[in-house]
């Protein structure tokens, strides 16, 4: 009889396309190499293994990008993506990508999406190839300017560094006139992220609500939440579809303040120590959940908490989707969720 690891691998292969299985499996092998039992992390090897792509100011499929340091004190870098018009057929020239970055607000409204990559607070970056592709997809899909945040990662930079970098990015965007649009110019900004990035998007949105800053919407993809008590999906799916509870616990221990447990509000915002949202003007949310993600119960509970707190939320639950399904355009889950995101952005811009 096959061992449990082999059985789990076979189940996983049946649930996802081969390309996705290879992609996520390679991530898992690398991740296991990088985490150390003493809580440290091999950052040099992580940077070597991470597949990266440089910014490209020359448009590719109508999207151009460039990197910009927006805070010298922390060397906070963002990668900015924007749609670029087709070349003038008479001159074959392409409008300069940078020429209007200090210009006035546009009279035509457009969305700005501040995106936080996943990687359990420890892995990946704004120039990781799969996230570059996802951000480009958001530009094409929504006609948006996308700002991908290269936030500081754990365990070198624990809580609240990632949240602080997200907050700094939002405040920077508010000062940029070229990101404002409409007859009454304003920043039409959405916060989005997957895995740990979804967690960051939530916490930055809470700060914005507390500060009276208007957020057009939150888009959370398989947002990473946790807690001390195990949920039914965590017990049922532990180790079956790429992720184990042991993995998750390591990352929380690496990110949370030392001596904090998993009911810390960063990990469990709707738990016993969380900040109530009832009195806050919290933004609308699109919560996308993979049914085969072991933390799916927590993501559904998060959406329920928002509703009970009096806030508008749409839950998109893909029962047979696994973590990372939104990274490759090879399933119906991918295309249908992208249409949900497009509709959410266009309805709230």
Image: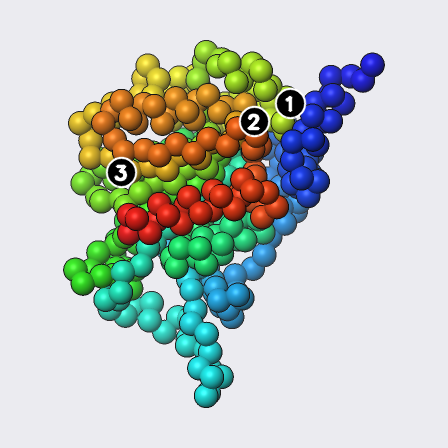
The answer to which of marks 2 and 1 sits earlier in the sequence is 1
Locate residue 188, reporting x and y percent: 27, 52
- For the residues labelled 2 and 3, the Cα–Cα distance comes to 27 Å
Please tell me which residue is depicted at 33% across the width and 67% down the height of the picture.
101
Q: CA distance from mark 1 to mark 3?
A: 34 Å
Residue 325 position in % (x across, y down): 56, 39
- Determine contact: label 2, label 1, CB under 8 Å: yes
Q: Few, some or many C-alpha atoms within 10 Å of disc 1 (few <14, some 14-19, many ≥20)?
A: many
Left/right of residue 106 with respect to residue 249 in the rendered view:
left
User: Could you say whether the residue bearing mark 2 is in a helix, strand or loop?
Assistant: loop
Q: Residue at x 50, y 32 (%)?
A: 318
Q: Position of residue 125 (x, y in %)?
A: 52, 46
Which mark sits nearer the N-terminus, 1 or 3? 1
Secondary structure, mark 3, is loop
- How many numbered marks does the figure carry? 3
Question: Looking at the image, is 86 positioned above or below residue 308?
Answer: below
Q: Which mark is residue 240?
A: 1
Asked whether the beta carbons under mark 2 and mark 3 sit within 8 Å of each other, the answer is no
Q: Position of residue 78 (x, y in %)?
A: 43, 53
Q: Mark 2 sits on what residue?
A: 292
Q: Residues within 10 Å of mark 3 (few under 14, many from 20)?
A: many
Q: Secondary structure at mark 1?
A: loop
Specify whether residue 258 is in view. Answer: no
Nearer to me, 266 or 299: 299
* Residue annotated with mark 3: 283
Contact (CB < 8 A) between labels 1 and 3?
Answer: no
Displayed quadrant of residue 35: top right
């Amino acid at each position: 009889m096959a061992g449990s690891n082999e059985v789990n691998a076979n189940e996983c292969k049946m649930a996802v396309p081969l390309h996705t299985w290879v992609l996520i499996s390679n991530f898992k092998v690398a991740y296991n190499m990088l985490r150390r039992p003493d809580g440290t992390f091999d950052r040099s090897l992580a940077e070597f293994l991470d597949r990266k792509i440089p910014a490209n100011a020359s448009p590719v499929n109508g999207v151009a990008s460039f990197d910009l340091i927006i805070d010298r004190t922390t060397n906070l870098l963002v990668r900015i993506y924007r749609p670029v018009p087709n070349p003038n057929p008479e001159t074959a020239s392409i409008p300069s990508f940078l020429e209007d970055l200090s210009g006035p607000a546009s009279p035509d409204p457009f969305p700005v999406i501040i995106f936080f990559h996943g990687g359990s607070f420890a892995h990946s970056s704004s120039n990781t190839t799969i996230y570059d592709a996802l951000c480009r997809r958001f530009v094409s899909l929504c006609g948006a300017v996308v700002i991908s945040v290269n936030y500081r990662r754990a365990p070198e930079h624990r809580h609240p560094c990632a949240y602080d970098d997200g907050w700094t990015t939002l405040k920077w965007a508010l000062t940029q006139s070229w990101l404002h649009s409409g007859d009454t110019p304003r920043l039409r900004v959405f916060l989005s992220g997957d895995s740990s990035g979804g967690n960051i998007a939530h916490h930055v949105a809470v700060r914005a609500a507390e500060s009276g800053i208007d957020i057009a919407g939150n888009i959370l993809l398989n947002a990473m939440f946790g807690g001390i008590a195990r949920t039914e999906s965590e017990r049922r799916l532990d180790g079956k579809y790429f992720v184990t509870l042991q993995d998750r616990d390591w990352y929380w221990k690496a990110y949370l303040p030392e001596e904090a447990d998993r009911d810390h509000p960063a990990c469990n915002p709707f738990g016993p120590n969380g900040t109530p949202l009832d009195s806050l003007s919290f933004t609308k949310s699109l919560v996308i959940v993979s049914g085969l993600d072991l933390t799916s119960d927590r993501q559904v509970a998060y959406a329920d908490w928002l509703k009970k707190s009096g806030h508008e939320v749409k839950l998109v639950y893909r029962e047979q989707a696994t973590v990372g399904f939104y990274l490759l355009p090879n399933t119906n889950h991918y295309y249908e969720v992208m249409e949900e995101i497009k509709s959410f952005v266009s309805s709230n811009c």
